[in-house]
Amino acid sequence: MVKGRMLQGARAMAEMCALCRPKVISAYPITPQTLIVEELSQIVADGDLEAEFINVEGEHSAASVVLGAAAVGVRVFTCSSSQGLLLMSEVIFNIAGMRLPVVMICVNRSVSAPLNIWNDQQDSIIMRDSGWIQLYAENNQETCDLLLQAHKIAEDHRVMLPAMVCCDGYVLPHAYEIVDLPSQAEVDAFLPSYDPIYKLDIDNPTTMGAFADPEKYMETRYMIQETMKKSLSVIEEVARDFGSSFGRSSYGLFEKYRVDDASTVVVALGSMAGTIKDVVDELRDQGEKVGILRLICYRPFPKEALYEALSAAENIVIMEKDISLGGSGAVATDMRAVFYGREACPRISGFILGLGGRDITVDDIKTTISKAQHQVADADFVGLKEDLELEGING
Amino acid sequence: MKITLGTVTHPGGSRVNKTGSWRTASKPRFNHQACVACDVCALVCPEGCIFGTGQNTYYANEDYCKGCGICAEVCPVHDIEMIPEAGEDG
């Protein structure tokens, strides 16, 4: 018998959020995150979660509310997407700088203009420099599993950094899948109540994130950078704990699928890995040594672990749903830096797929893999419509 | 000085963090020749770091003075001068 319930992704994420017992939730609805916020607001209104759900006039305020609540020393949750996340961005950086273990779900969506409500990962990728840990999920089960782990990682006294769990808009929160959610007792045993190092307290007044002149600011960035590096082992440790507590494996920094003897390895984040795994199986049946490394932890970027995992490959094929316009894909840029000046020097190609909800087909993936086996690509767009005339480009 | 996680500070931090180090070019010298104890220098000081109890007693606490020069500018008897940070010979 299959364990779990058939749930819409957003419902599963909201239930998992409630199981983590946040004391304050603040979020502003934005497509395609809205369902999660609606479900959470219902759960609180029904009295099924003892928490304050604070309605606000926008995402800047939502992020500010959870910042303040976390500073007072309670577990918090927020959730956003695309323009909403961008509106939060000032506060997103402040939360990290103030070392508050806020946890949020980013339902990945493209960024305007033009207005587009569909999935790519540009929104969270923009936040990669903020000091937040970023974990990307492949399916609804993993989004829930990572949400639970994110609280434990973020609140670990060796870390004390915020964490963002990213899931692909529509593809996950709107889809119905069987999700196995743990019991409250199991969650309580895995995730102890939040124990802040510092908190705002009228009996012991403090100022947080006040001011640092040129004699001190740089040290605060260094502290986060060093902590990010150290948090890699905490992320792995929490994933192992999760596996032994719930009997379901969690991959930690990344998942290797048929990678060990592969000469060509695809690297991707999020839900598109599901399709890529099917392509890998098909190509393996035809005798091609192909695998996929699905990156879960994008920040901190697990440089050494990736070098170890991929140094035997001849071709690394990065498929990503983001682009630093005028540069390259974010993941490809980071991956090239991993191998620069090292002994292993696989061919590293970058491809941009699925922007603004463009389908990523089996054929797209096959063509991309084949192309990368013959030439190095910097940031090649895959799946462009050839029949469209583009002013200033070909028209 | 310890930098805490999130630069959390406790009351009284300014006693440790002596911001007078921000002063770059000059600092006030109170001549104590013609002072009439009008208290205007203390009143206008944006740092609130000028103190005095009577004629020719005023001084700036250099641990916090930023050297803005407003005291010297407003002194009605021109008894305050801005001098180079390194001292009169500097």
Image: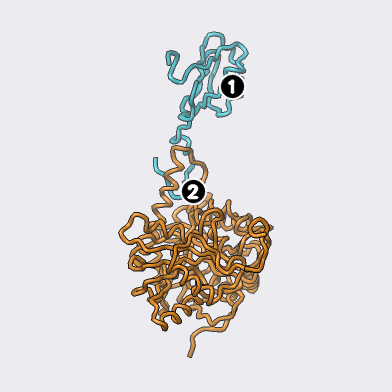
Chain colours: A orange, B cyan
- Residue A101 visible within the image: no
Instruction: Tell me: residue A42, above or below residue A202.
Output: below
Chain at numbered mark 1: B
Instruction: Identify the residue at image location x=42%, y=82%.
Output: A286
Q: Give left or right: position of B47 versus A245.
A: right
- Residue B76 visible within the image: yes
Quarter of the view holding residue A81: bottom right
Residue ID for mark 2:
A204
- Between the residue at mark 2 and the residue at mark 1, the CA separation in whole angstroms equals 37 Å
> Could you say where residue A88 lies in the image, as x and y percent from the top left?
60, 55
Using the image as rendered, state which of residue A36 and residue A114 is in the foreground.
A114
Using the image as rendered, state which of residue A342 and residue A243 is in the foreground.
A342
Residue ID for mark 1:
B70
Nearest to viewer (mark 2 / mark 1): 1
Dot 2 and dot 1 residues touching (CB under 8 Å): no
Q: Residue furthest bottom?
A: A1
> Could you say where residue B53 lies in the image, as x and y percent from the top left?
54, 19
- Quadrant of the drawing holding the C terminus of chain A: bottom right
Instruction: Identify the residue at image location x=56%, y=12%.
Output: B79
Instruction: Identify the residue at image location x=44%, y=79%.
Output: A283
Disc 2, SS = loop
Chain at numbered mark 2: A
- Counting labels gives 2
- Name the kind of residue labelled 2 in the image: Asn
Disc 1, SS = helix
Q: Give left or right: position of A30 versus A123.
A: right
